[in-house]
Image (cartoon, rainbow, N blue to C red):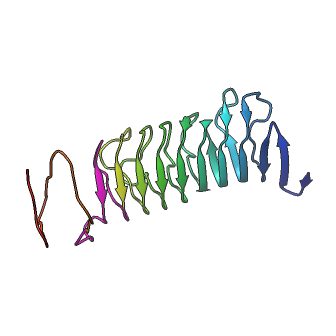
Amino acid sequence: IQSGSISLKDDYLNIIIGSGSSADNNQPYTSDNVVIGRNINPTSNTTTKIENVLVGNDIGFPRGTDNTFIGHGIRRTGGDFITIGNTIIGNGAGKSIGGGNYNVIIGLNAATNGTSLTNGDNNVFIGALASTSANANQQYSIAIGYSADSRGDNTTYIGTPGQTTHTYLEGLITGSSLEIGGNAYVSESLAIS
C-alpha cells in the first residue's frame, strides 16, 4: 500500500510503516521486525536483524535481535552497530550506542549525559539524563534518577546529584561491604558482623 509519504509493507514477516523507513527486506536473515515511524533505517544490509521493535523518528536500526527502541533520535550517531536485547525508550536516549547488550535505558537523553554509553553491557539507566561519567563501555551499573551518575562498573546510584537529601531502603541490606560517603542515620537497630 502506498499513500503519499506512508508505506505499509509485509515482507519476510517484517511490518514497516513510515516514510523513509525499511527493514532491509532483501536480506534472508531479516525477519519479524516491527518498524513504525519516519527515517528508521538499517545501518548494515548484510547481517541478521530479527525480532526488533523500532517506533519513532530518526532511529538507527541495529544488526542484532530482540531490541526495542521507542523515541526520536535513538542511536543516530556513527555507523554500523550490533546489539542484542536492549530496551531504549526516550527521545535522544542511547544515541551513541555502538554495541552492547542487555541494557535498559529509559528517559530523555538517558545514557548520553556526561560520558555517553557506547558499548557497555547489562546496565540500567532510568531517568532524564541518567548516565555515567566513568567510561563509555561500562558494565553492570545502575543509575536511577534525574541526571543520576552510575560512576563506574558494578555500581548503583539512586537519586539526583546535589538534590537528593534522603534515600530510604526498606528491609535487610546485605553485601560484603558498606561504604557511607556522608552521614548515616539508623532509626531502629544496626547489626555489623
Q: Position of residue 8 (x, y in %)?
A: 84, 50
- Residue drawn at 91 percent across, 52 percent down: 2
Task: Between residue 173 and residue 31, name the one nearer to us.
Answer: 173
Q: Residue at x 38, y 41 (%)?
A: 136
Quarter of image, res 83: top right
Left or right side of 35 for 174: left
Instruction: Assign the magenta stretch its main secondary structure.
Output: loop
Q: Is residue 136 left or right of residue 108?
A: left
173 and 109: which one is in front? 173
Question: Number of labelled discs?
Answer: 0
Q: Position of residue 52 (x, y in %)?
A: 65, 43
Q: Is residue 156 magenta?
A: yes
Among the 4 quarters of the image, the one containing residue 67: top right
Q: Which residues are magenta?
A: 145-167
Residue 157 within the magenta-colored segment of the rendering: yes
In the displayed structure, would residue 49 be above or below residue 188? above
Q: Is residue 69 left or right of residue 155?
A: right
Q: What residue lies at 66% left-to-right and 32% top-to-bottom?
A: 44
Q: Look at 62% across and 44% down and name the residue there.
A: 60
Indicate the position of residue 120 as horizontal and vertical percent values. Answer: 41, 39
Residue 125 placement (x, y as % from top left):
41, 54
